[in-house]
C-alpha cells in the first residue's frame, strides 16, 4: 500500500508528488494524459506570477511562499523557470483591478509604482494607455515557463522515488478499509491517503462535493510584431488590463511565437472537458483583435499560434482546498478559476502537509470548502 496516491499530475498534482516524494513518502500518481500536455489548464508556454494580488489580499502570504519554492525548484532543476519582467496593470479609476492591487500592496507592504498614463506610454512605448486609466507597475512580477515547471516537478519526483503512471485514467476511487482503492484500466491500487487534483476533471472525480464547478473554454493567441517594442529583452513587461468590464493579459516577446495576448474574462461553457473544440472558431479572435488595435498598435494582426485552455471556476472564483467532507484522508484542490498556476509550488506543499499531517501552517482558511455550506 502506498502512503499517498495523487490523481491528476498537472500544475497542482505535479507539485504535490514532488513535495511528497521529497519528504520521503511512498507516493504514486495517476494522469490520463502524459504531462505536460495541452488538454487541460497547464500549457501555453507562459503563466503570469505576481504578488500584489487584486483578487484577495489573503493570497499574498501564499504567493510569497510560492516565489521561494519556484526558486528552489529552479535551483534543483538547474534551469530557470521564472523570469522577472515586471507587470504593467491598468484599469478605470473606479474599477476593480488597480484598486485591488493597491489594497494588497498596502496591506502587505509590497513594492509597486504608480504611473500616470503618460509615464506608462513613455516608459513602455508599445502600449497605448488611455488618459482616463489608473496605472501601476509591479517590478517583482514575471513569467513562469509553465510546461517546464510541470516537467521539472515530475522528473524530480521520480528521482525521489515517486511512481508515476501516465496515460492511465482513474475510473473511480473509494474507501477501502483503512485506506483507499483507486481503480484504473490497469487494475486497483491502494493508498492510505488520497489527493485529488483533477483540474477540469475535478468535478467528476469529486462528484459528491456539493459545490458547482463551471468549466470555461478560453483561447490563447500569439501575434507577430513590427519592431522590438514588445521584446522582453528591450524591457517590455507582462501586462494586465481592465477595460469595459473585461480583462485582457499578455506577455512580452520571448521566443519565435511573438506577443501573447488573451482575454481573462468571458469564455464558452464546456459540459465535458474531454470534448472541447480545439480549433480556432471565427469568434475566438474578435475581442483580442479589438484589444490589440486599441492598446498594442505595434502588434500586427498576423497570428502566429493559437491554443485553447480550460478554466474551472468556483462560485466565488477563489480556490477550493481542503479535506473531502465525507472521506477522512481525502484532500483536494479544485476551482482554480483561471488564476491558479502561479500558486502550484506552494499548493503542492499545502496538499503534502494535509496528506501527511492532516493540517498545514499555511493560511488557507479562506479557501476552505466549508465556506459554501448553507
Image (spheres, rainbow, N blue to C red):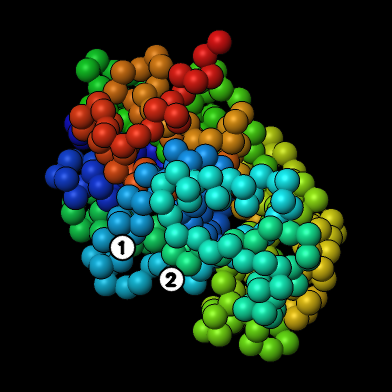
Closer to the camera in the image, 41 or 274: 41
* In the displayed structure image, the side of residue 113 where residue 163 appears, left or right: left
Dot 1 crowding, Cα within 10 Å, few <14, some 14–19, many 20+: some
Q: Which mark is residue 219?
A: none
Q: Which residue is found at the position 25% from the left and 54% from the top?
A: 157
Q: Quadrant of the C terminus?
A: top right
Local SS, label 1: helix
Q: Position of residue 290 (x, y in %)?
A: 83, 64
User: From where the camera sits, is residue 38 visible?
Assistant: yes
Circle nearer the N terminus (2, 1)? 1
Q: Residue furthest bottom?
A: 227
Residue 84 in percent (x, y) is at: 44, 70
Residue 269: name its quadrant: top right
Task: Identify the image quadrant of residue 203.
Answer: top right
Residue shown at 21% from the left, 47% from the top = 21
Q: Residue furthest top?
A: 374
Image quarter of the N terminus = top left
Q: Position of residue 315 (x, y in %)?
A: 61, 29
Kindly identify which numbered label has been placed on residue 83: 2
Q: Which residue is mark 1?
A: 71
The answer to which of 142 and 75 lies nearer the viewer is 142
365 displayed left or right of 266: left
Amino acid at each position: 500500500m502506498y502512503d499517498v496516491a495523487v490523481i491528476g499530475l498537472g500544475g497542482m498534482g505535479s507539485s504535490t508528488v514532488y513535495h511528497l516524494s521529497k519528504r520521503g513518502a511512498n507516493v504514486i500518481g495517476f494522469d490520463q494524459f502524459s504531462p505536460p500536455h495541452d488538454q487541460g489548464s497547464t500549457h501555453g508556454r507562459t503563466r503570469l506570477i505576481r504578488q500584489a494580488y487584486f483578487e484577495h489580499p489573503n493570497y499574498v502570504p501564499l504567493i510569497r511562499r510560492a516565489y521561494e519554492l519556484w526558486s528552489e525548484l529552479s535551483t534543483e532543476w538547474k534551469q530557470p523557470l521564472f523570469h522577472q519582467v515586471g507587470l504593467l496593470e491598468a484599469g478605470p479609476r473606479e474599477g476593480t483591478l488597480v484598486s485591488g492591487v493597491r489594497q494588497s500592496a498596502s496591506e502587505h507592504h509590497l513594492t509597486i509604482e504608480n504611473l500616470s498614463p503618460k509615464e506608462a506610454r513613455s516608459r513602455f512605448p508599445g502600449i497605448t494607455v488611455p488618459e482616463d486609466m489608473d496605472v501601476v507597475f509591479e517590478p517583482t512580477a514575471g513569467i513562469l515557463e509553465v510546461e517546464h515547471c510541470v516537467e521539472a516537478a515530475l522528473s524530480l519526483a521520480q528521482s525521489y522515488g515517486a511512481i508515476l503512471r501516465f496515460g492511465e485514467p482513474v475510473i473511480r476511487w473509494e474507501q477501502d478499509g483503512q485506506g483507499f482503492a483507486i481503480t484504473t484500466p490497469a487494475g486497483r491500487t491502494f493508498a492510505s491517503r488520497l489527493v485529488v487534483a483533477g483540474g477540469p476533471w475535478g468535478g467528476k472525480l469529486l462528484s459528491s462535493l456539493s459545490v458547482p464547478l463551471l468549466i470555461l473554454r478560453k483561447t490563447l493567441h500569439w501575434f507577430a510584431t513590427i519592431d522590438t517594442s514588445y521584446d522582453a529583452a528591450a524591457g517590455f513587461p507582462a501586462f494586465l488590463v481592465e477595460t469595459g468590464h473585461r480583462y485582457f493579459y499578455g506577455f512580452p516577446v520571448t521566443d519565435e511565437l511573438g506577443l501573447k495576448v488573451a482575454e481573462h474574462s468571458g469564455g464558452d461553457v464546456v459540459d465535458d472537458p474531454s470534448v472541447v473544440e480545439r480549433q480556432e472558431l471565427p469568434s475566438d479572435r474578435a475581442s483580442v483583435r479589438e484589444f490589440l488595435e486599441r492598446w498594442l498598435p505595434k502588434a500586427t494582426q498576423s497570428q502566429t499560434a493559437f491554443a485553447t485552455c480550460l478554466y474551472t471556476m468556483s462560485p466565488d472564483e477563489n480556490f477550493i482546498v481542503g479535506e473531502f467532507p465525507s472521506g477522512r484522508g481525502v484532500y483536494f484542490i479544485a476551482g482554480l478559476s483561471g488564476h491558479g498556476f502561479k500558486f502550484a509550488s506552494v499548493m503542492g506543499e499545502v496538499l503534502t502537509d494535509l496528506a501527511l499531517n492532516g493540517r498545514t501552517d499555511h493560511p488557507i482558511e479562506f479557501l476552505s470548502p466549508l465556506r459554501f455550506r448553507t
